[in-house]
Image (cartoon, rainbow, N blue to C red):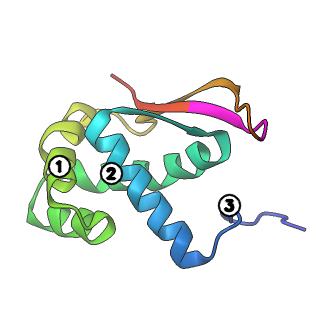
Amino acid sequence: MRHRHGYRKLGRTSSHRAALLKNLSIALIKSGKIETTLQKAKELRSYIEKLVTRARVGDFNAHRIVFASLQDKESTKKLVDEVAPKFRDRKGGYTRIIKTRLRRGDAAEMAFIEFVE
């Protein structure tokens, strides 16, 4: 049973799950909006919002912490310099999830995840 279990396993090993969240985060930062499965979007929301909260400070340590999670220079720079300052006066809830459709192949629930403007 998963009573009060902290995260979704998504059918992957821990290293695969970490790589998945990192790549989804990079895609979201670069494009601003991506479509993925609902469960991945819900797990990504927690991951990316913690990064945005760290990046809002905008100092050197924020760059280091975000880069340690993303391992991508362009995405780190864009998150700290462009995306996070938009949310400077916001307490949380930087992303929005919109359910879209059922995927044809396996009937998985799909959803858009995007930054709130």
Going from N to C along the chain, the mark reached first, 3 or 1, is: 3
Which residue type carries mark 1? Val
Q: Quadrant of residue 19?
A: bottom left
Whole-percent x, y for residue 93 in the image: 46, 36
Q: Nearer the viewer, residue 57 or 8?
A: 8
Is 109 contained in the magenta span?
yes
The disc placed on residue 13 is none
Q: Tell whether 103 sits left or right of 35.
A: right
- How far apart marks 2 and 3 lie (CA) works out to 19 Å
Residue projecting furthest to the front: 105
In the rendered structure, find residue 26 and report the number of the disc placed on it: 2
Q: Secondary structure at mark 1?
A: helix
The amino acid beneath tag 3 is: Leu
Asked if residue 110 is positioned above or below residue 4 in the image, the reply reads: above
Q: Which residues are magenta?
A: 106-111
The residue nearer to you, when weighing 61 against 10, is 10
Q: Earlier in the sequence, mark 2 or mark 3?
A: 3
Mark yes or no: residue 57 visible. no
| C-alpha distance separating marks 3 and 1 | 28 Å
Residue 100: quadrant of the picture? top right
Q: Which residue is mark 1?
A: 80
Residue type at mark 2?
Answer: Ile
Q: Which mark is residue 10?
A: 3
**Residue at the (30%, 63%) spot, across then down:** 70
Left or right of residue 109, residue 59 in this image: left
